Image: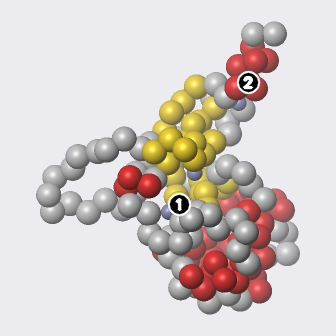
Amino acid sequence: MDNRQTAPDEILNRHGIRPTSVRILIYKTMNRFHDTFSMADLEEVLDSVDKSTLFRTLALFAEHHLVHLLEDGSGSTKYCICRNDHICGIEELHCHFYCEACHKTFCLDHTHIPAVRYPAGFEVRQIDYLLKGLCASCRAKRHE
Ligand SMILES: [Zn+2]
Ligand SMILES: [Zn+2]
Ligand SMILES: [Zn+2]
């Protein structure tokens, strides 16, 4: 299901998050990023929100599966909005692509991570499936 057309307060409610005005503001700001973003990216556009509120809100969003977390090797945690209204199964998670030239991390929304086997009794909490290389525009620039 695609959440893009649904009102932010309803989306927060669906995820079990009480929609306060600051949370709605942060959610709306996250929606302006088409791909992944870091806390620093949010800070840059949300100068009215203090850092600790932002940090706590992101942790809350992650806990309620409103955002996916990923580590792309850049040293800062990246986030992307979950477009499902339930906790994604492994088969619903998508891959990411890190561009080594522009350092952007793209969501490959339609590329699901391959089936991964892991031992019985283990519980997976996060999977970082990352492709690295050059994005289309950086690649085009190199071949000019
Ligand atoms: Zn999800
Ligand atoms: Zn690039
Ligand atoms: Zn993503």
Real-space Cα separation, disc 2 to disc 1, in angstroms: 26 Å
Residue type at mark 2: give it. Answer: Cys
Q: Is residue 54 above or below residue 78?
A: below
Displayed quadrant of residue 79: bottom right
User: Picture coordinates of residue 20 (x, y %)?
Assistant: 71, 89
| Secondary structure category for the residue under label 1 | strand
Residue type at mark 1: give it. Answer: His
| Secondary structure category for the residue under label 2 | helix
* Frontmost residue, 55 versus 117: 117
Q: Is mark 2 within 8 Å of ligand 2?
A: yes
Q: Which residue is mark 2?
A: 138
Q: Is mark 1 within 8 Å of ligand 1?
A: yes
Q: Residue at x 67, y 54 (%)?
A: 37
Is residue 59 visible in the rendered image? The answer is no
- Mark number, residue 79: none
Characterize the local packing of mark 2: few (<14), some (14-19) or many (20 or more) Cα atoms within 10 angstroms. some
Q: Is residue 128 left or right of residue 23?
A: left
Q: Is residue 71 above or below residue 63?
A: above
